[in-house]
Image (cartoon, grey):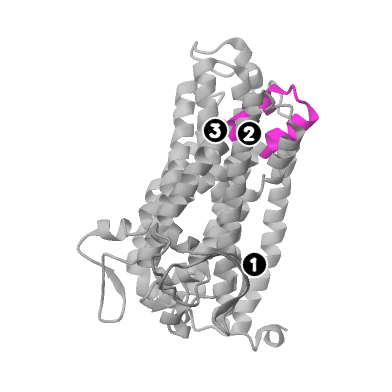
Amino acid sequence: MFESLFGSVDAVLLARIQFAFTVSFHFIFPAFSIGLASYLAVLEGLWLKTGQSHYLDLFRYWLKIFAVTFAMGVVSGIVMSYQFGTNWSVFSDKAGSVIGPLMAYEVLTAFFLEAGFLGVMLFGMNKVGPRLHFTATLMVAIGTFISAFWILSANSWMQTPTGHIIGENGQFLPGESWWAIIFNPSFPYRLVHTVIAAYLTTAFVVGAVGAWHLLKDRANPHARIMFSMAMWMAALVAPVQIFAGDMHGLNTLEHQPVKVMAMEGHYQSHPEGAPFYLFGIPNSKEQRIDYAIAIPKASSLILKHDPNAPLAGLDTVPRDEQPPVGIVFWSFRIMVGIGMLMLGIGMWSLLARVKGRLYDWPLLHRGAMLMGPSGFVAVIAGWVTTEVGRQPYTVYGLLRTADSASPLAAPAVGASLVAFVVIYFAVFGAGTWYILKLMSHRPKSGEAGVETEPGPTRTAGITPASALEGGQ
């Protein structure tokens, strides 16, 4: 059956689709858990500082959601890593001496840190003191950041490889300093941009849940806290993300100019200022943008801060070194467009605060609900822009994707792809449904946690009894 379905399809293309599918599923869970872990730390810290039981209730409410999200992220990540050996064995052989240690550092630091404190965070509220439990929550939050640090360092090295030497067999080997590998030119920008994206993703999920419950009951204090905190994050952090994205774009222009050409849709060079295409249909065959709607010289203004600055186009790049322009062009616009909408919601929430209508403006709440999944769409669009824009290379400029794949027949890759699609949608679809069910539950006083055994919460004498109702 698989021979008839995939016999005429390129095995490398199927391997790429499989990796893209699995990593897209995986990426949405860390994008949520990184921000949610920090949000839980803030909630527990506010509870310890103020003694207000609402913060403890919200901590327990979101802790259950975090537990499911974290578990699905771990499982999907483990499965994804096996593809380096099955579908991309040549890449693993050639780049393993650089990528392997970076992945190992992630396990030895972040994974062990999270594993060591996650149990205390999930099940230790009634068994350890509040300060020790808060420490465990902080360690899990720090662990998620460290995990992002190492994974993004490895990915960034593939985008802007430095600090390596090439051995006799064409293998990438560490040079004199690991610092040059870890802190490669694009890594700091990519780390900041991605982590902020994770925080915004979490903020808009929390804001959507708060808005949902405010539409049902404007007086719900838990919903008010959630919505207010999320909107502060949107209003304050979305502008920072736009600035970070601009810095990342300038760094990409310096080190990966072909990717920027594809993002901008610049098939032709512009010696006297390049336009920014708001809309258009990339036509790679004819090397032009059809039905273009553009702002004259705006691209030069954004990328060079000079409307008359020249920008090179894809006409300076051989056809076999050009990425798929249509995918990169539109994924970039989806990411930027969602970023602008996030900024708009944040500014709208500030207006609502000034007017004293943050909790009784149904149109704002419905807008926040619609924006609930926007962070996930944006991070996937950003990932597509980054990874597809790097093509036709796995290690930019040095190792082509076509030369990185395992020598497998297309039906074998296609069979595993079908299996992944069926299993992922079944397992992670059920998990996502359960998370949505948890979110639909109204936060309440005395919110139940994930403790396996009942018992009073230990307070060390720092919180009033009213804050401990959920631990009874």
Find residue 1 and report its image quarter.
bottom right
Which label is found at residue 40? 3
Kindly report which numbered mark, 3 or 2, lies closer to the viewer in this rendering.
2
Reply yes or no: does residue 228 show up in magenta. Answer: yes
Q: Mark 3: which secondary structure?
A: helix
Residue 136 drawn above or below residue 193: above
Of 339 and 272, which appears nearest the observer? 272
**Lower position in the chain sequence, tag 1 or tag 2:** 2
* Residue type at the position of mark 1: Phe
C-alpha gap between disc 3 and disc 2: 22 Å
Q: Which of labels 1 and 3 is toward the front? A: 3
Magenta range = 208-231
Between 250 and 101, the one nearer to me in the picture: 250
In the picture of the structure, the residue carrying the numbered disc 2 is 349
Badge 1 element = helix
x, y (%) of residue 11?
Answer: 57, 82
The spot of residue 157 in percent (x, y) is 36, 63
Q: Which residue is mark 1?
A: 420
